[in-house]
Amino acid sequence: MTMSLPTPSIAPPDVIRCAYAELVVTDLAASRAFYVDVLGLVVTHEDADTIWLRAFEEYLHHSLVLRRGDVAALGVIAYRVRSAADVDVAEEYYRQLGVPLERRPAGTTRGIGDAVRIVDPLGFPVEFFYDAEHVERFTRRYDVHGAGAISRLDHFNVATPDVPFARSYYEQLGFRVSEDIQDEDETVYAAWMFRKSTVHDVALTGGDGPRLHHIAFATHERSQILHLCDHLGALRESDKIERGPGRHGVSNAFYLYLRDPDGHRVEIYTHDYYTGDPDNPVVTWDVHDNQRRDWWGTPVVPSWYTDASLVLDLDGVPQPVVARSDDRESDVTIGADGFSYTRKGDTDTGFKLGAQV
Ligand code: 4SX
Ligand code: FE2
């Protein structure tokens, strides 16, 4: 049964886009080697316990914070709102929802102005801010872009047991659905939701949660994703490649999933499409469509369905994880008892999914 939420008496804050994530990492030097030396993210600032990173096109202080800690986890995901006044709106909106909330004066997070942090109704630590320090935008600094240059943060993907509830929560916050995955009984396995005019700022993945499934950064070209694979191979770190490279069905993006030294999943993503018109059509995929998650039909590795990162509450304590009780896509996809199809209606060419693994 899907839970329901109270409706606040005021309109939600005007969210522009996903803006930054903070990951707690257990070995800061190992994480630096991965995010800076391999992925090529730019260091805005660093001290003994924290590194503030951004991608080449970003001019806000950071899009990723790595903080040293004992337990690898998500510290926060942050959305940027349209104005300073929207931060006050966010505070009032979430007070009315009755969730844990903290007002954070400018500088509580380096580079970020006045902000509100909450635990959202799905159990995730989420921040809303507008003001942030501007730093140099490296768009034309080709002298420092590597061949795998990452341009900007693209989206978050969160694992949650009740996708319809999560979807209605985010719809109330003003996000729209671009694509989703369902079965013939209308069980929803995943949904992609946006504020900026791309396929998503956040994806909801049905699974045990709250857990962070991944954060994703964009490149401009597929070749840059292929270069990152070559780079990891040359370093003898091919085990950091979890899934891909490939072409998603959902979103149409070209993709690669990596696991950082703590197992946090990072996607490198390019070539999705414009969604900004008010009548942007929603694409619904059948969970049995063998091309939904990889357009070339490449099987999804089981770890992609099962593994995800713990998330912290506002006191830094890992949130308990609730198991998904609805059907799991991992059962449908990698279990022994389902069929998928490549050509719809042609069951003879459908193959036993158990054979994929
Ligand atoms: O695997 S999916 O094709 O469903 C997919 C996963 C599409 C877009 C994403 O960003 C993603 O992480
Ligand atoms: Fe993604």
Image (spheres, rainbow, N blue to C red):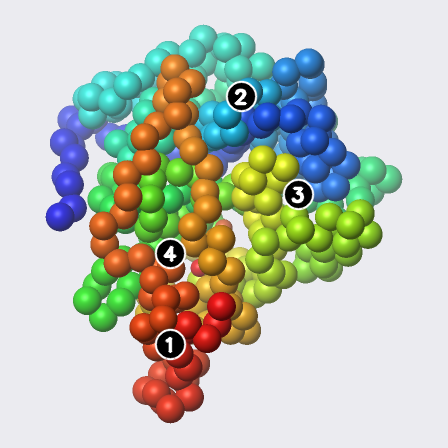
Residue at 53 percent of width and 15 percent of height: 109
Of the two numbered discs 4 and 1 in the rendering, the one whose residue sits closer to the viewer = 1
Q: Quick one: label 3 or label 4, which is nearer the N terminus? A: 3
Q: Residue at x 37, y 22 (%)?
A: 313
Q: Using residue 27 as the reference point, say whether residue 143 is left or right of it.
A: right
* Residue at the disc numbered 2: 70
Of labels 2 and 1, earlier in sequence is: 2
- Ligand 1 within 8 Å of disc 1? The answer is no
**Mark 3 or mark 2: which is in front?**
2
How crowded pointer 4 is (Cα within 10 Å; few <14, some 14-19, many 20+) is rated as many
Q: CA distance from mark 2 to mark 4?
A: 37 Å
Q: Amino acid at mark 4?
A: Ser
Q: Which residue is mark 4?
A: 178
Q: Which residue lies under the disc numbered 3?
A: 151
Of badges 2 and 4, the one in the foreground is 2
Closer to the chain start, of discs 4 and 1, is 4
Task: Say if mark 3 contacts mark 2, CB within 8 Å.
Answer: no
Q: Position of residue 170 (x, y in %)?
A: 30, 41
Q: Which residue is mark 1?
A: 340
Residue 351, image quadrant: bottom left
